[in-house]
Image (cartoon, helix red, strand yellow):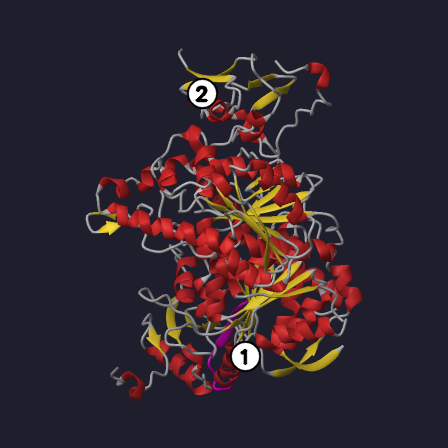
Amino acid sequence: MKKIIEGSLALAEAVKLCRPHVVSAYPITPQTHIVENLAQMVADGELKCEFVNTESEFGAASVVLGASAAGARAFSASSSQGLLLMAEVLFNIAGMRLPVVLACANRSVSAPINIWNDQQDAAALRDAGLIQFFAEDNQEVHDMIIQAYKICENPEICLPALVNLDGFILTHAFEPVEVCDQKLVDEFLPPYRPANYLSVDKPMTFGALFEPTWYQETRYRIQQTMEEAKPLIEEVSKDFEKTFGRFSGGLLEKYRMENADTVFVSMGSVVGTIKDAVDELRKGGEKAGVLKVRVFRPFPTEAITEALEGVKNVIVMEKMISLGAGGILASEIKNAFYKNPQAPDVSNFIFGLGGRDIPLESILEAYTKAKKQKNRDVFVDLRKEALEVTY
Amino acid sequence: MSKPVGIVTKPGSSKVNKTGSWRTTRPVFLHKNCNDCRICVMVCPDGVIFGSDSSYDADLDYCKGCGICARECPTDDIEMVLEVK
Amino acid sequence: MADKTKRKEKPPVVESLLAPGHRACAGCGEALAARLIMDAAGSNTIVATTTGCLEVFSTPYPESAWKVAWIHSLFENSSAVAAGIEVGLRALGRGAGINIIAQGGDGATADIGIGCLSGMFERGHNILYICYDNEAYMNTGVQRSGLTPFDSHTSTSPSGSVSWGNPTEKKPLPQIAAAHGIPYVAVATASYYVDLQNKVKKALSIKGPKYLQVHSPCPLGWAYKPEDTIEIGRLAVLTGLYPIYEMENGEVTKVRKLGKKRLPVEAYLKPQGRFRHLFAKPEGKEEIRRIQKIADGNIERFGLV
């Protein structure tokens, strides 16, 4: 049923449809509407689950860890500082191979404190072993949650997932969303049946001490699983289309890439603006296109190199940065083309940090810059007054 | 390939580790003054004292030789002797 | 030799729910306490444990000494993980009659994990939290924690030419727990093992959050001979330095009185290397006096004499 709802509610509706047993909540702007919506659904008897208001995000993540280990389907959400506080637990959940799904309302990280959108929070967790999705619009937000549970709970996967939606830009924006039908979701997503869980009938020890003779293989296994997740993610998106009658999902999305010689690569809601920029450029005769990266972890190396085959210039625009190194998405794209004789020219632009607005003009400017000064990493739209601040 | 790890499915599998090899002294149960109080059974940190009917002994595969049983026995029926190989 | 004809039914030999073969030090008070607690709780129990001695010595993969369902996550979150298990089981309709225990050392409970602990208490989960109090971060080499006693030598509160060791008194964790309004709080010791098991059974019969602090003598960290574990723990109680008692709904309901058995604090301090520095210099007598005052305070406060 189509509703005009904000991203937070689209996400909450999806969580409800997945019939979680346990939802843990700790508020942080701009995630709060997600947990508030879920709380109201529980209070009205629409969502029958255990809803736990914890004492911190660390507690919230620990609660879903325990619930998942006991065999329950669990969900939590956070943002920025909260996600960082959960970090220790999220590494733990991934290492323990528990299929918890979390949402992150992407927000900048302190210091300085800033409550607006960028993707540094998710980037900080990229090594943790969580499958990471980035939504472009509220429909994707909704669909990604449902597909995430199916992917994660697959017995060959058993890894947690982080569904990222840009804070305020998606969480608080109203868009038309096709809310999935409960019966179809039940068909698509069967109940969670883990092979191993805490049980008094079959007692097992979870979380043993792994000495050097045993540890390394656990990391190898997660890395292997991440590789195996790539084709599975594509498969699940096809299942989704079969069940719900519309396509949504997959590792990437190509926009106007036929005969494109210059392609923008980006993640999240800004892709919408970039698509508009490409429409402008195409009108002016430029052969531009957009490659949206929907799944950041596992990094879809093969799919990306295939999609960008024949492309001369790649413009990576990202809302994350590895301080001391540079753009993260850009370096991973460059890495994907290592020793590839057809490697395109890659320009890296970092923008939108701290919620800085990204007007269409900035993207067109980036296009022009990229065509002129190739392979030069640049911060977009730096403000003179802000640069001249003395503390 | 992707089976979850970090889960030990064999409860009590620590028993493969024969900690008896650690000790330098060993308890000898005299079976002379025992009054079946079972304090030795209770106070063993590793839970390796077994028996009944005034006839108790330590499982020497695991006994670490801490000496608590001998120390706590109210009738002095347990003696710690040097483990000599 | 006892008269066999007067003997009652022989108790059966039962293997503990914490199996041997684990790597606890010889004479470990915490291993003893854990074994007794598991046996008192029974096999219908799920346990969440923090990082620390207990977890490290009992689960070196692929071995595990635990015969109950057991999980270790992180250092500070056994209470929150247990909370997740409790609500998860309830949502799955599988929780009826299952004991859920969260446990951790003094560092994990009083310091790094106090936030999660407080949250678990405040939300009213039906969980028994057990704090194994060996009075320092033992597994990492005897560093000072919030429950390290006054003037105790640890590696991060060492005695030295200008220091008497740990300068603060123990964080009053049982009182902090009780202040949350939870139905049952108790303090026990591995040395009074029957009392310990009784308190575990009683706690598990009560609905809601419960806190049990168990004094766990550590031969390595406290520097005494392993065979003296039970004796040392007894002396802690008999000097009044570690009163053992129960609190129900915030009120102290039962204490272990000392009466004529009461001893001066020297009896407890002298046999332990961690207090050796108090006896090395004549100025140490003043410190011992201060420790005696702490004991006197406990005795008065809890009516132990």
Q: Is residue C97 left or right of residue B28?
A: right
Q: Amino acid at mark 1?
A: Gly
Q: Secondary structure at mark 1?
A: helix
Q: Secondary structure at mark 2?
A: helix
The numbered dot on residue B21 is 2
- Asked whether A111 or A161 is in front, the reply is A111
- Within 10 Å of disc 2 (Cα), the crowding (few <14, some 14-19, many 20+) is few
Quadrant in which the N terminus of chain C is drawn:
top right
What subunit carries mark 2? B
Residue C230, image x and y in percent? 48, 33
Residue farthest to the front, as pictured: C260
Report which quarter residue A203 is drawn in: top right
Q: Is residue C15 above or below residue C2?
A: below
Question: Which residue appears at 33% of the width and 78% of the height?
Answer: A372
Q: Amino acid at mark 2?
A: Ser
Q: Report whether mark 1 lies on the same chain as mark 2.
A: no
- Asked whether A5 or A35 is in front, the reply is A35
Question: Which residue appears at 40% of the width and 47% of the height?
Answer: C137
Residue A334, image x and y in percent? 39, 62
User: What segment carries the magenta color?
Assistant: A283-294
Would residue A105 be counted in the magenta stretch?
no
The numbered dot on residue A272 is 1
- Asked whether C302 or A308 is in front, the reply is C302
What subunit carries mark 1? A
